Image: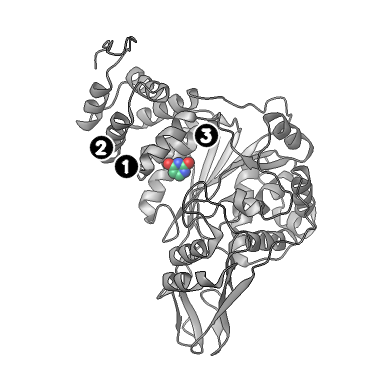
Amino acid sequence: MTAASSEASGSIEAYDAVDVIRAKRDGGAVPEPALRWMVDAYTRGYVSDAQMSSFAMAVLLNGMERDEIRVLTEAMIASGERMSFTGLGKTTVDKHSTGGVGDKITLPLAPLVASFGVAVPQLSGRGLGHTGGTLDKLESIPGWRAALSNDEMFAQLRDVGAVICAAGSGLAPADKKLYALRDVTGTVEAIPLIASSIMSKKIAEGTDALVLDVKFGSGAFMQDIDRARELARTMVALGTDSGVATTALLTDMNTPLGLAIGNANEVRESVEVLAGGGPADVVELTIALAREMLALAGQPDADVESALADGRAMDAWRALIRAQDGDPDAPLPTPRETHTITAGRAGTVSRMDALPFGIAAWRLGAGRARAEDAVIHAAGIDLHVKPGDTVSEGQPVFTLLADDAARFDRALAALDGAWSIGDPGAVPERAPLVRERITA
Ligand code: URA
């Protein structure tokens, strides 16, 4: 592609967006300077939404080479501020999950890892659609504040070790603009675009190391394990190429994680894990991710289980909540209305499909349909059993939680056929929760 001048609007531009689109449309690699220009010109408003959506569709259809994905990511990082935690005197390690149903792992994980003297700068988001957002869950805690300045973040990492807060708008603004465009142009699913979107924010955040929890299955963003693996490999390569020590776990999201799906109930469950209890799958994933994070921080032999059992992780949690103006002892919101579904027969729970449970919780008010909607913190679903558990006839299977009983019908419609009870003793095969580990 030759550098061209476009003077139509009076500005002199180095490249022509149509040339960049054509190169990708025809299956070629876009040369580095042209790709950097495309992202910069889009952020400045010179390249239009129509042109960028055409380019995004060409990427979705034709893919990108590893080097192009690196350049795209770097260009998105360059569109905004880069944070730095040098001067903290501690290694920083972050975790990113691609999101799932009942995925509250950040809540016990960040304080657990911080209790080993590692700094965990966890910049998190809000939920949209059937997957919940970490900030929405934590905002169930009276007084807790998601918005922190960079100085507050730095001080909390120094004093407490973990911070969970909203990412400022200064990080990768090109991604913000492109992500909103992808959302309305059918181009969210392109692996190069997902990988560069996630990793541009994580690299700009300035963490030393990063562990990715890439989920596959019905309740995940990527339903197919092969695509989840490709996404994980792409992101691990991006992190590694930019000097962030990065590994990924591929984890199963066909069944909701834990027994709580919602916001306040997920906080309650996280506190149980921090108190040394909690559902086995939540504990297993928390420990697996903590081990990965601590290994990257130079502590491969850390005794993670002991920190949950002896209260060290709980102490770090309480300090984290207090530092962000929350009251860890305040009662959490409870729903005005509940509706319990019981087993129609005795047997063994054979299946609980994550996606419909996520959609049902969302319809109960636990999630939002539009970014500006408020979530209802007490809404959601409490599961009383999981696949593999035996039930007798009439035993509670799950309880819907809402502030308005009118929401139950639509939630129940989503759950129609989403779970089943098999013959007594017919224990379903349980696939491992952590399926693969991906390293550079
Ligand atoms: N999360 C992101 O931040 N970006 C994507 O493209 C998908 C999920």
Q: Find the distance from the CA under tag 3 to the CA under tag 1.
A: 22 Å
Residue at horizontal 66 percent and vertical 51 percent from the top:
139
Q: Earlier in the sequence, mark 2 or mark 3?
A: 2
Q: Please state if 233 lies on the left or on the right of 185 as rendered.
A: right
| Sooner in the amino-acid sequence: mark 2 or mark 1 | 2
Asked whether residue 357 appears in the rendered view, the answer is: yes
Label located before the other in sequence (3 or 1)? 1
Q: Which residue is mark 2?
A: 62
Q: Position of residue 322 (x, y in %)?
A: 78, 47
Q: Quadrant of ligand 1?
A: top left
Q: Residue at x 50, y 61 (%)?
A: 362
Q: Quadrant of the N terminus?
A: top left
* Front tag of 3 and 1: 1
Seen at 73% across and 33% down, the residue is 152
Q: How many marks?
A: 3
Mark 3 in CB contact with mark 1 (< 8 angstroms): no
- At label 3, the amino acid type is Lys
Mark 1 close to ligand 1, CB under 8 Å: no
Question: What is the spatial separation of the Cα atoms under label 2 and label 3, in whole angstroms?
Answer: 24 Å
Q: Amino acid at mark 2?
A: Asn
The residue at the point 52 percent across, 34 percent down is: 201
Residue 201: give its label.
Answer: 3
Crowd band around label 2 with a 10 angstrom C-alpha radius: few (<14), some (14–19), many (20+): some
- The quadrant holding residue 338 is bottom right
Q: Nearer the viewer, residue 10 or 87?
A: 10
Q: Of residues 226 and 55, which is closer to you in this image?
A: 55
Q: Are marks 2 and 3 in contact (CB under 8 Å)?
A: no
Which secondary structure, mark 3?
helix
Residues at marks 2 and 1, CA–CA distance in whole angstroms: 16 Å
Q: Nearer the viewer, mark 2 or mark 1?
A: 1
Q: Is residue 219 above or below residue 235?
A: below
